Image (cartoon, rainbow, N blue to C red):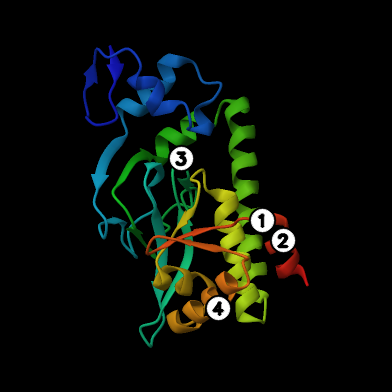
């Protein structure tokens, strides 16, 4: 029997368990029965755009695997302005604070698209990483997250708005498997600490200079990655 990601039961389809686990990096190296056992104890949710994966103040008692979709982590300033901490997409893992007992999320996770995610309990993760091979992979993953946080900080440090927007689009392009980037202006603005109208004005400038191309209402394509990267570095 195989595990179906759309249900809390086992099913007889031959390949759905593989689709469940093939991109969950910290499961690599675990015996198959342990992988299945961890998934058996996890919680699967299918969420719509605007739904919450978790709320600010919720206990960080699980890691969240974004199997498919796009999620933003956001907090709000006292003036109501949204501050987007990060945007997560297919196969990303939200680990923040999960290994700190009693920790609570300082922000909310909101779906930008229809999203399929899986919650794996902290106790099950702790048991899994008692395997040295899995522990090394988790260390690598957390190191990558630290590198990612440093990259986001570097983008926010850019003083010129047009370069900040361009750097953010480069950052999103590197993290996406899609042929173009799909993000609304408000979400870009919240990610780079600028007003939506400022982002809109600078996107028009980048389009006019041929550094990016618009795709539909909220899509962007980078025709020449090296050229845009050179622009950001000038």
Q: Earlier in the sequence, mark 4 or mark 3?
A: 3
Q: Is residue 106 visible?
A: no
- Check whether the beta carbons of the residues at disc 4 and disc 2 lie within 8 A of each other: no
Q: CA distance from mark 4 to mark 2?
A: 17 Å
Q: Residues within 10 Å of mark 1 (few under 14, many from 20)?
A: few
Q: Residues within 10 Å of mark 3 (few under 14, many from 20)?
A: some
Q: CA distance from mark 1 to mark 4?
A: 18 Å
- Check whether the beta carbons of the residues at disc 1 and disc 4 lie within 8 A of each other: no
**52 relative position to 106: left or right:** left
Q: Nearer the viewer, mark 1 or mark 4?
A: 1
Image disc number at residue 227: 2
- For label 3, the residue is 91
- Check whether the beta carbons of the residues at disc 1 and disc 2 lie within 8 A of each other: yes
In the rendered image, the vertical position of residue 78 relative to residue 38, given as above or below: below
Secondary structure under badge 1? Answer: loop
Q: CA distance from mark 1 to mark 2?
A: 5 Å
- For label 1, the residue is 224
In the rendered image, the vertical position of residue 168 relative to residue 92, given as above or below: below
Q: Nearer the viewer, mark 4 or mark 3?
A: 4
Q: Residues within 10 Å of mark 2 (few under 14, many from 20)?
A: some
- For label 4, the residue is 202
Secondary structure under badge 2? Answer: helix
Outermost right residue:
234
In the rendered image, the vertical position of residue 26 relative to residue 165, given as above or below: above
Observer-nearest of 156 and 144: 156
């Amino acid at each position: 029997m195989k595990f179906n990601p759309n249900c809390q039961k086992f099913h007889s389809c031959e390949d759905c368990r593989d689709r469940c686990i093939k991109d969950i990096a910290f499961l690599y190296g675990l015996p198959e029965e342990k992988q299945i056992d961890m998934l058996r104890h996890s919680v699967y949710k299918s969420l719509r755009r605007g739904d919450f994966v978790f709320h600010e103040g919720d206990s960080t008692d699980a890691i969240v695997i974004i199997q498919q979709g796009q999620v933003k982590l956001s907090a709000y300033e006292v003036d109501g302005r949204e501050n987007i901490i990060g945007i997560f997409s297919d196969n990303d893992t939200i680990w923040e604070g999960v290994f700190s007992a009693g920790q609570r999320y300082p922000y909310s996770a909101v779906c930008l698209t229809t999203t399929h995610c899986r919650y794996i309990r902290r106790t099950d993760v702790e048991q899994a990483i008692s395997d040295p091979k899995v522990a090394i992979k988790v260390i690598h993953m957390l190191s990558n997250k630290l590198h990612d946080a440093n990259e986001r900080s570097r983008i926010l440090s850019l003083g010129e708005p047009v370069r900040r927007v361009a750097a953010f689009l480069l950052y999103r392009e590197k993290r996406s498997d899609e042929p173009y980037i799909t993000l609304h202006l408000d979400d870009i603005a919240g990610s780079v600490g600028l007003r939506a109208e400022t982002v809109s004005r600078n996107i028009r400038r980048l389009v006019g200079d041929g550094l990016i191309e618009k795709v539909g209402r909220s899509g962007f394509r980078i025709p020449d990655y090296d050229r845009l990267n050179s622009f950001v570095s000038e």
